[in-house]
Image (cartoon, helix red, strand yellow):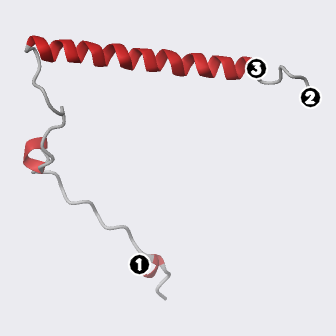
Amino acid sequence: MPDSFGKRQRESGKAKKAAAREERRLARAQRDADREAGLIEAGTPIEASEPAALGLENEPEPRPKPDASDTADKS
């Protein structure tokens, strides 16, 4: 097997990961700068998980899945 087997794929994968890492770093630096300027609140950006807060209070209940006894032929 040659030494260069899969080399391009490894290099492109590493380059994609590095680009994604750099993009996350820049976004984090921008958020930090925005927090210092008072444009966004400090803390976690996660909202409340209550159904009413998410607008899910009127969602129908999920239907139960049929079990084996429901799908068996009753003759």
- The x and y percentages for residue 55 are 11, 42
Q: In the rendered view, would you say 65 is above or below 49?
A: below
Label 2 crowd (10 A; few <14 / some 14-19 / many >=20): few
N-terminal-most mark, 1 or 2:
2
Residue 19 is situated, as x and y percent measured from the top left of the image, at 49, 15
Name which residue type carries label 3: Lys
Crowd tier of the residue under label 3, counting other residues whose Cα lies within 10 Å: few below 14, some 14–19, many 20 or above: few
SS class, disc 2? loop
Q: Which residue is mark 3?
A: 7
* Camera-side mark, 1 or 2: 2
Measure how far apart labels 3 and 2 are at the Cα level.
12 Å
Displayed quadrant of residue 66: bottom left
Looking at marks 3 and 1 on the same chain, the residue that comes earlier in the sequence is marked by 3
Q: Are marks 3 and 2 in contact (CB under 8 Å)?
A: no
Residue matched to label 1: 70
**Gap between marks 1 and 2 measured at Cα:** 57 Å
What's the distance in space between the residues labelled 3 and 1, CA to CA? 55 Å
Q: Which residue is mark 2?
A: 1
Say what secondary structure mark 3 lies in: helix
Give the amino acid at mark 1: Asp
Nearest the eye: 60 or 41: 41
Sequence-earlier tag: 3 or 2: 2
